């Protein structure tokens, strides 16, 4: 039976993993814009301006997280489970948010402006590096608010939150 302390530990580690994963994603995206070696594949992504599909985005995010995804199991099972699930949850959320911003950015209701969509639409090489969240752009001064909702977005056919490329 799980005790209160284990539940608190699991929830805390879930939240920390989720938030830390968003920070790592932000900085890796910034690094892709300054390093040719790290950003070679990313340049192609900017040329194509498409996502790979949620499943393939998720695969790439999990590959990046594999080095640290089990680290908290060294502390305790409860912390390990929370950390593992927080890491998986962020990878899934980010993969979904990335694909959604490429296909249906008006559905990103959790942000005032879909930063990744705007990053691509306006060729922002120095702004709006967030993929799933805009927190870190605001914290590190790279958030650039623009009037992004134009006729192009408003004339898109109405689609649900789930109508996007999954693989």
Image (tube, grey):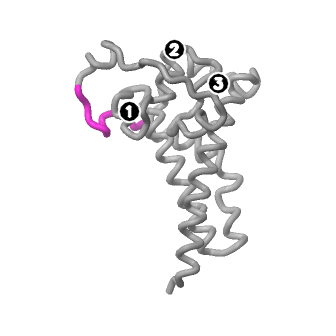
Q: Do the numbered discs 1 and 2 sit on residues whose CB atoms are within 8 Å?
A: no
- Residue at 43 percent across and 26 percent down: it is 102
Residue span colored magenta: 158-167
- Residue 116, above or below 161: above
Q: 94 and 125: which one is in front? A: 125
First of labels 3, 1 by sequence position? 3
Q: Do the numbered discs 2 and 3 sit on residues whose CB atoms are within 8 Å?
A: no
- Residue 105, above or below 15: above
Secondary element under disc 2, as helix, strand or loop, is loop
Q: Do the numbered discs 3 and 1 sit on residues whose CB atoms are within 8 Å?
A: no
Instruction: Give the image quarter of residue 46.
Output: top right
Secondary element under disc 3, as helix, strand or loop, is helix
Predominant SS along the magenta part: loop
Secondary element under disc 1, as helix, strand or loop, is loop
Please provide percent x and percent y for residue 29: 64, 31
According to the picture, the residue beneath numbered tag 2 turns out to be 122
Q: 111 and 117: which one is in front? A: 111
Which numbered dot is residue 147? none
Residue 124 is one of the magenta-drawn residues:
no
Q: Nearer the viewer, mark 2 or mark 3?
A: 2
According to the picture, the residue beneath numbered tag 3 turns out to be 41
- Residue at 63 percent across and 24 percent down: it is 42
Residue 163 is one of the magenta-drawn residues:
yes
First of labels 2, 3 by sequence position? 3
């Amino acid at each position: 039976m799980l005790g209160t302390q284990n539940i608190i530990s699991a929830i805390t580690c879930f939240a920390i993993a989720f938030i830390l994963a968003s920070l790592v994603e932000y900085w890796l995206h910034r690094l892709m814009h300054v390093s040719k070696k790290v950003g070679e594949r990313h340049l192609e992504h900017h040329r194509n301006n498409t996502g790979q599909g949620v499943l393939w985005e998720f695969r790439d995010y999990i590959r990046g997280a594999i080095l640290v995804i089990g680290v908290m199991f060294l502390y305790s099972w409860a912390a390990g489970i929370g950390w593992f699930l927080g890491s998986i949850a962020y990878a899934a959320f980010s993969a979904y948010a990335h694909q959604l911003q490429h296909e249906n950015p008006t559905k990103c209701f959790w942000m005032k402006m879909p930063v990744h969509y705007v990053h691509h639409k306006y060729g922002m090489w120095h702004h709006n590096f967030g993929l799933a969240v805009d927190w870190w752009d605001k914290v590190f001064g790279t958030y650039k608010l623009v009037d992004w909702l134009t006729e192009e977005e408003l004339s898109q056919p109405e689609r649900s939150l789930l109508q996007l490329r999954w693989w």
